[in-house]
Image (spheres, grey):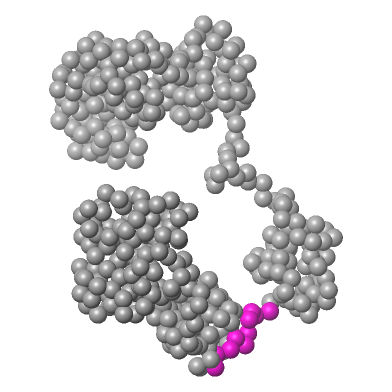
Amino acid sequence: MKNILYQIIRDQDKHLLTQKGVYQIKNKHNNKVYIGSTSVKFSHRLTSHIRELSKNRHHSIHLQNSYNKDKNFNKFEISILEVCDTTKCIELEQKWINFYQSYDDKFGYNISPTAGSCFGIKKSKEEKIKGFERLRKVTDEKIIEIFHLRNNLKLSNRQISKKIDISKNQISSILTRSEKYQYVKEKYNLKLEVKHEKKFTKADVLNIYDLYEEEKMTIREISEKTGFEFVPLRHLIYNENLYREEKEGLKFNIEKNRKSKTRKIIRKRGYRVKKKILLEETISNVFDLKYNSDLTEESIAEKLQISLKEVDLILTFRYQRRKYNQVYSEIKTKYNLRERRTTLNEQDIINIFNDYNSGKYLIEDLNEKYEFYDVGAILHNGRLSEYYKDIIVKNNLKIDKKSTKNHDLKSKSITERNIKRSKTYKLTDPDGNEIIIKNLAQFCQDKDLHPANLSRISKNGKSYKGWKCLCLD
């Protein structure tokens, strides 16, 4: 729509599209004009005009008919007559309507002689019907089918919606609102005979009333006890107009905050909150295993049956910080630990980039040097806050990607890490000889085998190229 707007607006007025005031839509063939004003940007209001014309929904029938003749926007020209405050828009619009006499069919397309209103314009019943028929989307056949499905087959709004592909709310408004599609209903003599199918008898209503008022049960608990559906029960309790005869003057005192005892799932911002909170003993065990054994973080998580993320949060003093503050302070004293910083200053960030580009440090080394747990995110622009982004842009900090300074260090570090993580395997070659190895990847590289396939057969007991594998760890 904005592309069309820029094509038909005058060039000298394009820079005013962000302003507010009075505008004109002119037909270049017959010089008829439409005058309007806007309290929002010209661009917003004028694109809405173009959208309504293209969808055959414009409020000015004269302007719509003019467009419908050839459906070409190029015959129109838009110009901005006056820029003003929002308080003066109607006053100035009236001035220009009187000047051009755009309310007269001979000179313009405005429907009303009064700016900002349609008072004084009387439409006949035929004009109202034409306007309604022009705007409505639901056909007569579908409206007749809706009444047939409700009155004869007694289907619910949801079932009708699935059957004829119209929204449930629209079906409800067609059936219940008397002014909606009034002329179609009069034409075919359509009336709603069955508003809803009654699912509760008088005895059922009295039973539900006793459970809700005397025993203070929730709607869900009543549904579980009686077997009635939840939604009809809620309608019965919340809607006073339903089942008036069966209620016989009974009124349900609605308690919207009544909670079920059986549903104790805590919800916060749409997500389920985990009830599982680790104990102080578990937190202490994580630090003991970290600093008194050779176990990796993955092994610690597996041994204590917690997630790797929880181990990482505990070791960086971020898990349940307020609750376990005293525990963390005791652990720091016990192991003489310093808590890593959560923010870095500008000079530290500059030094980090310089150290990394020098080729003398790995990311793990920089984490320890600057006592910060996420140097990698700063170097590789991952999950950065605006504070770090501004410093990096300001000092034009970049990683020397073309350089291979860190290549040797990285390869050594990866090799050492793989050796530490490597497991012990017992292999049987095709001749039946047994071999015990430590590094499966290195062994496969020497023997021209695929390590993933050998690792897989160690779990399922099968063979790969005559080789059998068993993990001893």
Name the foreground residue: 158 vs 429: 158
Residue 222 appears in the figure: yes
* Quarter that holds the N terminus: bottom left
Q: Nearer the viewer, residue 280 or 338?
A: 338
Q: What residue is drawn where x is 67% and y is 50%?
A: 263
> For residue 386: magenta?
no
- Give above or below for 191 relative to 72: below
* Highlighted magenta segment, given as a residue range: 189-198
Q: Is residue 433 left or right of residue 298?
A: left
Can the viewer see residue 4? no
Q: Residue at x 50, y 9 (%)?
A: 337
314 lies above or below 78: above
Q: Given the current orientation, which residue lies at the most extreme front position?
A: 99
Place of residue 175 in the rendered image (x, y in percent of width and height, measured from the top left): 56, 81
To which quarter of the image does residue 345 belong?
top left
- Please, what is the dominant secondary structure of the magenta stretch? loop
**In x, y percent, where is residue 85?**
43, 51
Residue 204 drawn at (x, y percent): 77, 73
**The C terminus lies in quadrant:** top left
Of 199 and 389, which appears nearest the observer? 389
Q: Nearer the viewer, residue 98 or 328?
A: 98
Residue drawn at the location 60% of the way across and 18% of the way down: 325
In magenta segment, residue 190 = yes
> What's the residue at 38%, 12% (across, down)?
370
Left or right side of 320 for 349: left
| Total numbered circles | 0
What percent of the width, then of the height, locates residue 31? 24, 73
Q: Is residue 85 above or below residue 381?
A: below
